[in-house]
Image (cartoon, helix red, strand yellow):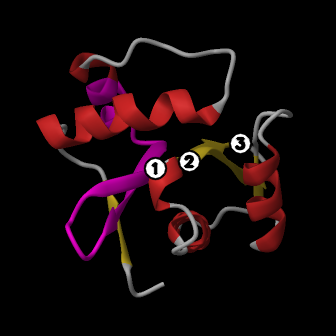
């Protein structure tokens, strides 16, 4: 996994917008949204939302993303790992696993009691990868 870096998105650069627009359609979701930079700003400005991007060390290209949504409740803190996707041309180098492990680490830091992951019922590859990392 040393070929991959994971960073929390805190600034919406042109590179981030381009990567999001490339990756989102690969989620195989029926709920696609238009992804202008203003929409992405909304995501990163939410204190209970963590948006992660995976980069390939060899060329610093953004190749994957994942969203961790933290939900404080009166009795506990829950979180949901959503939209885990790696560019089809960059799969197999551990980016999906690295995104999931980073999300798990953040969930632990935030004292999350229950962490779940979601994938489209049609996205068999994502389901398999999520099971592999313990979901």
Residue 38 on image: x %, y %:
24, 18
Above-or-below relation of 41 to 5:
above
* CB atoms of marks 2 and 1 within 8 Å: yes
Above-or-below relation of 110 to 34:
below
Query: Which numbered marker is on residue 52?
Result: none
Residue 86 on image: x %, y %:
51, 52
Per the image, the residue denoted by label 3 is 73
Q: Residue at x 46, y 54 (%)?
A: 89
Is tag 3's residue or tag 2's residue first in the polypeptide sequence? 3
Q: Nearer the viewer, mark 3 or mark 2?
A: 2
Magenta region: 40-64
In terms of depth relative to the viewer, which is nearer, 14 or 45? 14
Question: Distance between the Cα atoms at labels 3 and 2?
Answer: 28 Å
**Residue 134 visible, this orientation:** no
Q: Residue 60 colored magenta?
A: yes
For this view, does 51 lie left or right of residue 107?
A: left
In terms of depth relative to the viewer, which is nearer, 128 or 119? 128
């Amino acid at each position: 996994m040393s070929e991959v870096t994971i960073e929390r998105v805190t600034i919406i650069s042109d590179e981030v917008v381009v990567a999001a627009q490339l990756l989102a359609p690969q989620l195989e979701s029926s709920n696609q949204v238009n992804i202008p930079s203003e929409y992405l700003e909304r995501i990163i400005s939410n204190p209970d939302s963590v948006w992660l991007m995976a980069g390939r060390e060899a060329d610093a290209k953004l190749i994957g993303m994942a969203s961790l949504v933290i939900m404080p409740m009166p009795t506990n803190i829950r979180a949901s790992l959503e939209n885990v996707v790696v560019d089809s041309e960059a799969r197999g180098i551990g980016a999906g696993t690295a995104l999931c492990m980073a999300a798990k680490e953040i969930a632990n830091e935030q004292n999350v009691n229950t962490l779940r992951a979601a994938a489209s019922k049609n996205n068999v590859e994502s389901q398999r990868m999520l099971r592999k990392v313990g979901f």
